[in-house]
Amino acid sequence: MEERPDNVSLREHEADLRSARELTEERVKRLDEALTHLREMSATQRESDKLAVETALTSAKELSEAHNGLLRKMELQTETFETKAAADARFSRIESWRAMITGGLIVIGAVGLTNFVRLWLG
């Protein structure tokens, strides 16, 4: 405010006070609007953050459940799989049986052919 002489009238002081009050009221109004806007933005941000945390939590739970399911499946497969040593032993038994059956079929075929030749020649 500019400096005035001592003989300023009461009306001029009232006008100055009114002007200062209007300016203060306008500034308070703008600050209130800014504060209201900040509160709205803060509430919106909180909701957004809350949604992001809930989504991340849900995703983490789903990932954990999928991982645990995979582990259970692998444990079950491990229980049902055969070791290489057991498979080799089983295959060697199968090979020995196949060799005996093949040898037996050859002997039966030879005996049968011999009998057929004896019958034919008589």
Image (cartoon, rainbow, N blue to C red):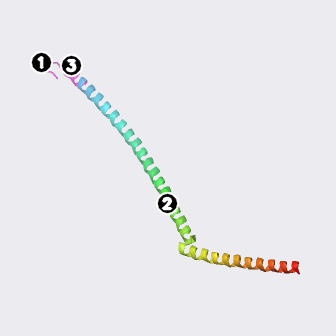
Mark earlier in primary sequence (2, 1): 1
Amino acid type shown at disc 3: Arg
Amino acid type, callout 1 = Asn
Quick check: 1 above or below 99? above
C-alpha span from label 1 to label 3: 12 Å
Write the residue at 52% across / 62% down.
Answer: 70
The answer to whether residue 20 is left or right of residue 88 is left
Task: Tell me the element at label 1.
Answer: loop
Residues in magenta, as a range: 1-18
How packed mark 2 is, by other alpha carbons closer than 10 Å (few <14, some 14-19, many 20 or more), is: few
Q: Is residue 66 toward the left or the right of residue 26 in the image?
A: right
Q: Earlier in the sequence, mark 3 or mark 2?
A: 3
**Residue topped by disc 2:** 67
Q: Say which quadrant the C terminus sits in.
A: bottom right
Is 43 or 80 nearer to us in this picture? 80
- Element marked by disc 2: helix
Q: Is residue 104 above or below residue 53?
A: below
- Place of residue 33 in the rendered image (x, y in percent of width and height, measured from the top left): 35, 33
Residue position for label 1 = 7
Name the residue tied to disc 3. 11
**Residue that appears at 30% across and 28% down:** 26
Q: Nearer the viewer, mark 2 or mark 1?
A: 2
Left or right, residue 15 beside residue 44: left
Image point (83%, 80%), residue name: 115
Quarter of the rendering containing residue 117: bottom right
Separation (CA) of disc 2 from disc 1: 88 Å
Depth check, front residue: 57 or 83:
83
Residue 89 falls within the magenta-colored stretch: no
| Image location of residue 25, percent across then percent down | 29, 29
